[in-house]
Image (cartoon, helix red, strand yellow):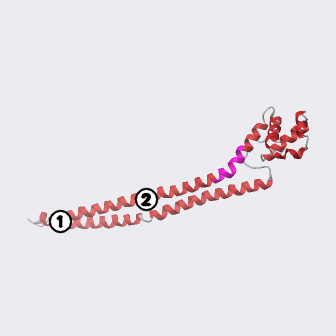
Amino acid sequence: MVFYSARPVQRVRQVVLDVVVLLGCVLAVVIGTTVSGAISGIAAIGTRVNRDGSAFQEQLGKAASALGKVPFAGDAVSQPLREASERAGAVAAAGTEQHDATVRLAHLVGAGVAVVLVVALLLVWLHFRGGFVRSATATARLGRQPAGTELLAVRALTTRPEVTRLGADVVERWRRGDPATVRALADLERRASGLPSGVQAD
């Protein structure tokens, strides 16, 4: 795979883009974590409801137990308190459920935000860098073929307007199989693809 151009200016731009995307991915994770933490703060409400409800349930339960010991009327007097204690327990359980649901939501939203941002950054990277990587890698592989130099020369003739810089008779010289012309055309194709002249990169 060829990730960076042999041309200094283009290579600097590619490195800068890679660093920006990498930093953006780190920032995306930080943003996702921050969002998750902000939503998780709401879970504290459920924690307080559970704590207060449990404490109230315990107090009512103790009071009901104490009243239940009253002779003759103990059960009748303590029954309302037992029912109130059960309702307090239900409130405490609801607080726990609210806490757990909020924490799950916080994790999902935080992870979702981070994933969306990272995917967006990777799409930007692929848009600006993927084309170069594919083209340069394909050119390097083509150049490693048994007749790679000749194949690159043909591609330069058919796709690169810059071939006119090699002279008005470049096509005629290529037809005659002039080695210098073939090498010059192949090098032109390599340079246009971001590869060093005469080097077959992996």
Q: Is residue 127 magenta?
A: yes
The C terminus - image quarter: top right
Q: Is residue 161 shown left or right of residue 13?
A: right
Which residue type carries mark 2? Answer: Val
> So how many labels did they put on this image?
2
State the residue position of label 1: 80
Are the residues tagged 2 and 1 within 8 Å (C-beta)? no
Please say whether residue 41 is visible from this viewpoint. Answer: yes
The N terminus - image quarter: top right
Which residue type carries mark 1? Answer: Pro
Quarter-wise, where is residue 42 in the image?
bottom left
Mark 1: few/some/many CA within 10 Å (<14, 14-19, 20+) = few
Disc assigned to residue 103: 2
* Depth order, front residue of 176/192: 176
Please name the residue shown 66% across and 51% down the image. Answer: 127
Q: Is residue 198 shown left or right of residue 42?
A: right
x, y percent for residue 145: 78, 33
Label 1: state its secondary structure: helix
Q: Is residue 180 magenta?
A: no
User: What main secondary structure does the magenta stretch of the protein show?
Assistant: helix
